[in-house]
Amino acid sequence: MHLQRLPLITFLFIAHFGISVRGKPPGDPESVAIAPNTLLENVDANLAFQSPFTNIPQLAVSLNDRHTTTILGQASRNKHVFAANLGPRNVSAAGAANTEEPGGGELTHDRQRFNWFPNPPVTFEHGVASGDPIDDSVIIWTKVTSQAPHSGPVVVQYEVSQDAQFLEQPVFRGTVLTSDDVDYVVKVDVKGLSPRTTYFYRFKSGDAVSPIAETKTLPRETDQVNELNLAIVTCSNMAHGWFHSYDRIAERKEVDVVVGLGDYIYEYDLKSYPSPIKALPATRNPVPAKNIVTLTDYRQRHAQYKTDKALQRMHAVKPFVAIWDDHEFADNTWNDGAPDHDPTRDGPFSQRKFAAARAFHEYMPIRPQNAKDDMYRVYRKFSFGTLADVILMDTRADGRDEQARGNRGTRRLISKDQEAWLYGNLEGSRAEWKVVAQQVLFAPVLQRILGWEIPLTSDTWMGYPAARDGLLNFVNQRRINNTLILTGDFHASYVSNLFADKSKYDKHTGHGSVMTEYVTPSTTSSTPMSDKRWKHKLAAPVLKWFNKGAQWVDLYRHGYVLQTYTRSKVTTRYMMVEDVKSYGGGREYLAAHMEQASGANRITSMEVKDD
């Protein structure tokens, strides 16, 4: 946060609060007192207040002037003196904040009259989460729910320990501020951690204590790593089912990181995208009960999803690495619009897009990125030592041209900046495996009939042939071995060998493949065959007919993907859950198992357990 953007209220806070927790007065268990050095640090430490883009600070959120009532009321009752429009310049040894007046004079707060701020009672109803781990830091997240109507800012402490019970002294602790300006979200980048280390964390506010959660830092980029276990998820519509996959992932001790490929929330009302087969309890109906458009709408929808207990259990034990897809904005979003967005009804798409991006930034445990051009960037890379680089793309909001419009040959799927970044990371990687995690289907599908482009499949890479051919040719010509693609969005399971030259690909042996693609099944969102096995049996052969590299397809079940990376191979398991429409339907089973040997660039063995 930048000083020039801070309104008067922030300076009033700065003059009144600081960082060090000092204890509570007798008989007032909900009060918090903190030495008056610089609340600015407490605000700035909460990434939710900051801009989603580190190089565009003007998009940060400032404390709202509505909060002056509480603070000024407390101050006047205790005869505190504030220097209007001035922040504290230093902190004396006694802990009193000093401000220099324009004429060179000095105004000092009397420590004996330091006031107790009545922190409202809160609860942690939305759980806790961690994400974007690197070798020396990780993002931790929570949201507080105030039990007092019209409450102002809330002070929240966080603690990080290597002891799961917090019986030992925390290795890190700090204090941050949150308010309704950021929907009472708390998001902290805990730095100075050790590589490849498990940590436990929790939050406190007044007498409220969050659940204790677990996270883990990554190895250094040059570290020798022999095994990596990823769980991959996508497409979780709360109104379409129970998030059983999240519970099963939480139970798996071997999973190091969960990769979310987008559609973490859905923007629809219930009528626009009803649940197939049968409705679920009304508690899973969308909140608010409409197609979401505004910042308030997107915040409410994110907050609703964060109350799901299975989602909370997964986030409490696994660091999460996430990208967005279309439903974090609107169905089939491109750079400047979406098919269902009506500017007359919904307002300018640019406002809706930024509202969705701001809510995503607040509610997801992701680290702000530098941005270019139209200010939307979530693409980034995570290195797991010398074993694997996980390269997260954004094929949705960064530079995408409208589907099936304009010159098909020059239509862009991603911006030039992202394309250069992707190619550079692929060619420059020294890791054994290059894992490209992204949103939309790469494998060939029927995209045109007599020159007419099919809208449904035009959203995939096939609708952007320059981008698709460019990546295949780049990987092939530069001989970048062990590149594979993880895909969401499709609501189905689909495994393919990918080739640059169809004439050189042998569908029987897989020779001629330059990459592979693993499409992740939806967590709950309705499948292409409306969750019906008989429809899948009819449609699967048609899909394979259009894709010479198709290895396995499942168009009717829900679940997640487990991948184990070693020096010699990648093992992929498609785990399905029994029934997402039933609260008790969370039993999981293995549907298919495949291996990809290092250097083969194709599926080298496969066993289908259940079809």
Image (cartoon, rainbow, N blue to C red):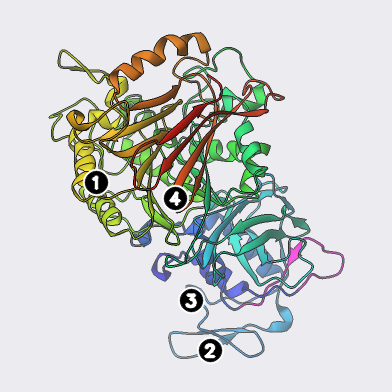
Q: Nearer the viewer, mark 4 or mark 1?
A: 4
Q: Position of residue 82 (x, y in %)?
A: 57, 75
Which label was assigned to residue 86? 3
Q: Amino acid at mark 2?
A: Glu
In which quadrant will I find the N terminus? bottom left
Q: Amino acid at mark 1?
A: Val
C-alpha gap between disc 2 and disc 1:
65 Å
Asked if the residue under mark 1 is in contact with the one under mark 2, i.e. CB atoms within 8 Å, the reply is: no
Q: Amino acid at mark 4?
A: Ser
Which label was assigned to residue 106? 2
Residue at image x 56%, y 72%?
14
Which label was assigned to residue 475? 1
Main SS of residues in magenta: loop
Q: Which residues are magenta?
A: 23-36
Q: Amino acid at mark 3?
A: Leu
Q: Position of residue 36 (x, y in %)?
A: 62, 77
C-alpha gap between disc 1 and disc 3:
57 Å
SS state under label 1? helix
Mark 2 or mark 4: whose residue is earlier in sequence: 2
C-alpha gap between disc 4 and disc 1:
20 Å
Mark 1 or mark 3: whose residue is earlier in sequence: 3
Which label was assigned to residue 568? 4
* Relative height, residue 55 to residue 351 (above, below): below
Q: Residues within 10 Å of mark 1 (few under 14, many from 20)?
A: some
C-alpha gap between disc 3 and disc 2:
11 Å
Q: Position of residue 41 (x, y in %)?
A: 54, 71
